[in-house]
Image (spheres, grey):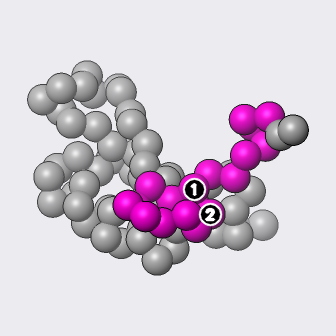
Amino acid sequence: MTSPAEEIPICSARGCRAPADWALRWNNPRLHDAQRRKTWMACPEHRPTLADFLDARGFLREVAPVAGSPTLDT
C-alpha cells in the first residue's frame, strides 16, 4: 500500500491520466484572499492549455515544477 505522499500526481485536464510534472497555482481574487492558492496539476501536454485558461481569467499566479519531476534542474 502506498501512502498519499508516495502517490504520483495526475494531470488535472479532463480525461488525462498522465503523470503531472507541473503545478499551476492560482486563485480567484473575487473569492479567495490574496495569499490563498489552489493547485491544478499538469502534464507537459496540457500545461499550456490549463495555464492559458487560468491566465485568461486573471487567476494564474505561479507555474512550478512538481518535486521529483524530470522538469526540475538537477
| Quarter location, residue 15 | bottom left
Q: Residues within 10 Å of mark 1 (few under 14, many from 20)?
A: some
**27 relative to 45, above or below:** above
Q: Which residues are magenta?
A: 3-21
Percent position of residue 40, x then y: 43, 49
Q: Element type at marker 1?
A: loop
Is residue 18 something one can see in this rendering? yes
Seen in the image, is 10 located left or right of residue 40?
right
Seen in the image, is 25 located left or right of residue 9?
left
Percent position of residue 10, x then y: 57, 56
Q: Residue furthest right?
A: 1
Which residue is located at x 38 percent, y 61 percent?
Answer: 14
Q: Amino acid at mark 2?
A: Pro
Q: Amino acid at mark 1?
A: Ile
Dots 2 and 1: beta carbons under 8 Å?
yes
**27 relative to 67, above or below:** above
Which residue is located at x 74 percent, y 56 percent?
Answer: 68
Seen in the image, is 60 located left or right of residue 47?
left
**35 relative to 8, above or below:** above
- Quadrant location of the N terminus in the rendered image: top right
Label 2 to label 1: alpha-carbon separation: 5 Å
Q: Which residue position holds label 1?
A: 10
